[in-house]
Every structure is written in C-alpha cells, then in structure tokens.
Image: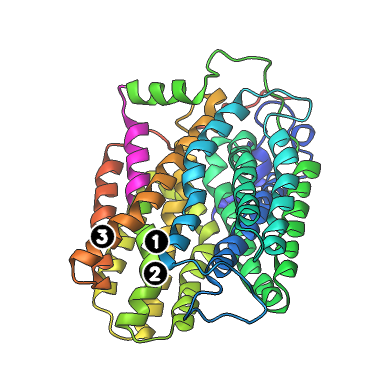
Amino acid sequence: MDHEFSRQHPWDEAVAPAADHRKQSGAGSGLARTLLLGFGLFGISVLWGIYNTQVPIFLQAGRPGFTVGATIVGYGFSTALTGFIMSLDNMAALFILPYIGALSDRTRTRIGRRKPFILVGAPLAALAFIGIPLLAGGPLPLFMAAVFGTLLTMDLFRTPVIALMPDLTPSPLRSQANGVINLMGGLGAALALWIAGRLFVYAPWASFAFGALLMLAACATVLIFVREPVAPEAADDEVGLLAALRGVARDPDRSAIALLAAIFCWFLAYSALEVFWTSFATNELQVSAGQATEMLAFFVGAIVLFAVPSGLLGARLGRKRTIMAGLLGFAVTLLWGYMLRTSSPALVMLVLAGISWSLILVNSLPMVVDQAPAAQVGAYTGMYYIASMLASIIGPTLVGTIIGLAGNSYRVVFIYGPLTLLLALGCMLAVRRGEAVTQPARPPV
C-alpha cells in the first residue's frame, strides 16, 4: 500500500489552503469534500448525457426512413443538419466558457466567486431543459429557443463548477481529486444513459424531468455543503480572459502554449473515435448500430473505473510522465484497431483505449491550472476548454473529410488518431511546468 496515502486522514494533512480547512470547506475531510465537489460534474454529466442522446431523436423524427416510436414527434431534419445543431454546444462553449471562467475569478460575493454562477445558471438550465420535450413537434422557433436556452444557461456554470476543484484542493492532490471528480461525472453519464433512456421510452418529458431534477439536486449539494475559500478583495494578477491569453502567449517559458496545443491534438484523436466508432463498427466489423453503441460502453466504463487510479499514478509518477504514457498507449491501441476484423478483440481494444485516455484526461486539467497565477484559475480553466472544444469542432469535419478522400474507409480513423497523438506527444516534450507544487508547511497551532 502507498504509505503516502495510508496515514490517518491523508487528505486532511494537505488540503487547507490557508486557514483551518474545516472552517473553509464545511466538509469533514478532503476526500469527503472532493466527493461533494464531484456532484457538480455529476449533475452536468446527467444533463449532457440526456441532451446528446435524445435531442437528435426529436430533430430527425418524421424523416422518411428514420425509425422511431409513433408517439415521438419531431422535425424530420437530415443527419447533416442534425449534426450541425448538435455541434452548437461546442461552438457556444468555445466563446462562453472561457469568458465565464475569467469573470468568476473577478467576482466577489458573500457566498464566493463560483457559487453565484451555479445558483443562477442551474435553475435556468433546468427550466429550459424541461421545455425541450414539451415543445418538441410544435413551432420550430420555440423548440430551438429551449435548445439554445439549455446551451447558454449550462455554460453559465460549467467552468465555475470545474474551477472549484483547484480553488479548494492544494496542488499535490489535484490529480487525485480530478480522478474522483471524473469518476462522479462518469457515474452521472451512466445514470443518464440507463435510467433516462428507459424513461424516454415511457414518456420523453419524464426523461428530461428526471435529468433536470437530478442536476438541481446535485448542484444544491455543492451549494449547501461546499464552502469556497475566502477570496481577497482584490488581487494584482486578476485580469480578464484576453489579458490572460496575452500573458500565456508572451510567456518565454512556452509551457502553457505547448500544453494547450497538446490538449488540442489529443482531443482531435478522441473526437474521431467518439464520432466515427459506430460507423466503423457497423461497416467494418459487421455489427448492428445498437451493438456498436453498446460496445462504446466498454470504452466509457474503462475511463470511469480507471479515473481514480489515473490520479494516483499522476501523483506518484508525475503528471507529464503519466500523460505521455497515456498518449503512447492510446496511439498503439488505435493502431491495433486498424487491424480489427471481429468484435471480440475490439472490446479489448476499447478497454485499453479507455484506460489510456483516463491517464491523459485526469491529469491534464491539474497541469493547466497549476501553471495559472493564483487569481487566474478560472481563466486557465477556460483556456483548457478553448483547446478541447476547438478540437471537438474542427476534428469531426477534418477526419470526415479524410475518410471521404480515402474512399469512405473508416479504418483511416486508426491512422489519423495515432498521428494526432504523436503530435500531442511532441508538444508535451516542450512542457516544463504544471507538476504538483509542494505546499509550504503550516505553522504549528
């Protein structure tokens, strides 16, 4: 057993940023507080899980050849138009999330910097979200107003929720904490797919109501039981997003730029697998669309189950080494995918890909925020989203074009992916900052 984490209350030993952590957090231990923080991502993941799987049904219902229950009404959109509408969340997030993150850095209220955004955004998002199934089949402008309302209000509090983790967790424990939080997020996504999927068959509004209520309960848990640390009235290094971006661009060390470039490159590989796996499996492995979707559960499940171990490995071996190991593992696994001919080894490949992706995902955000000045954590969290969302917007179109040029061979994904991962690996070699920062010892009481 790791002796560093086998002492009595090891999280408590390093978790207080300044004063007594129990007074600051309202939680009995650092691990308990991290679990409570995880409810924020849990609630967000529930809502996005339902949105991403069920809104496309409304958009396409009524189109000739699209099979769906007779009770579900929609707009008969094409797959191309549906895909465009479903990408709007990434487009909106690209501009909104970084701005909100930087704005929350400069916010001062009695309940903290991040909580006001949760307090306002979560109820508005729930209302807009419930409106989606209730307005489906009615006038298109009203339905799209509910869709856009959901996207915009969710973006009001996504970055502040994520920024709470580095706010409340000292540098040496951020990889472990991010592992726990990603575990909670994965559980939320799984719950959305399992329970909400069954409710959708019964009545679409019940699925969306379930997601909205669960998201509100999860956010309420964060608001009630997690206390933000007291922020100073003003700080010299508090700046807006554009100023923070200029600071990163002018930094002679270039570590932040290299890390953001690496994040962009590895999300190109991830988005290619996520978007085109079902097409590859149905066309090359000869499985049904339902089976292809179910196979992805092995990938997602591996990410969830390995989230906490990935954080522990990042703390023990170093974040940069752990991420680079994940990049190599992901690249080799995808190259194996190029040679797949049957579904059974494909499941093994997806599990190994999920483990490798977990090593990357869990340790990347802590590396970004540990390069941030103390008063710019929200802005740097927003930069992380700029890199990942930009890749999610550009990636599917880029790889889709390459697939078309290759004669619609979906196996190209398993060449394209490793190439982008090797580019990410090259960028990581230039990263010299972002490891856990040793916390100064607290004076005896």
Q: Which residues are magenta?
A: 252-265
Q: Quadrant of the N terminus?
A: bottom right
- Mark 1 and mark 2 in contact (Cβ < 8 Å)? yes
> In x, y percent, where is residue 233?
68, 15
Q: Residue at x 79, y 44 (%)?
A: 225
- Mark 3 and mark 1 in contact (Cβ < 8 Å)? no
Looking at the rendered structure, the kind of residue marked 2 is: Leu
> In x, y percent, where is residue 253?
31, 25
Magenta segment's dominant SS is helix
Mark 1 or mark 3: name the one nearer the start of the chain. 1
Image quadrant in which you'd find residue 405: bottom left
- In the rendered structure, find residue 401 and report the number of the disc placed on it: 3
Along the line of sight, which residue is nearer the eye, 337 or 172?
337
Q: Residue at x 60, y 48 (%)?
A: 148
Task: Determine the CA span between mark 2 and mark 1.
Answer: 6 Å
Q: Decide: is 3 above or below 334.
A: above
Q: Which residue is mark 1?
A: 356
Task: Determine the CA span between mark 1 and mark 3.
Answer: 26 Å
Left or right: where 388 falls relative to 265: right
Helix, strand or loop under label 3: helix
Q: Quadrant of the C terminus?
A: top right
- In the rendered structure, find residue 352 and report the number of the disc placed on it: 2
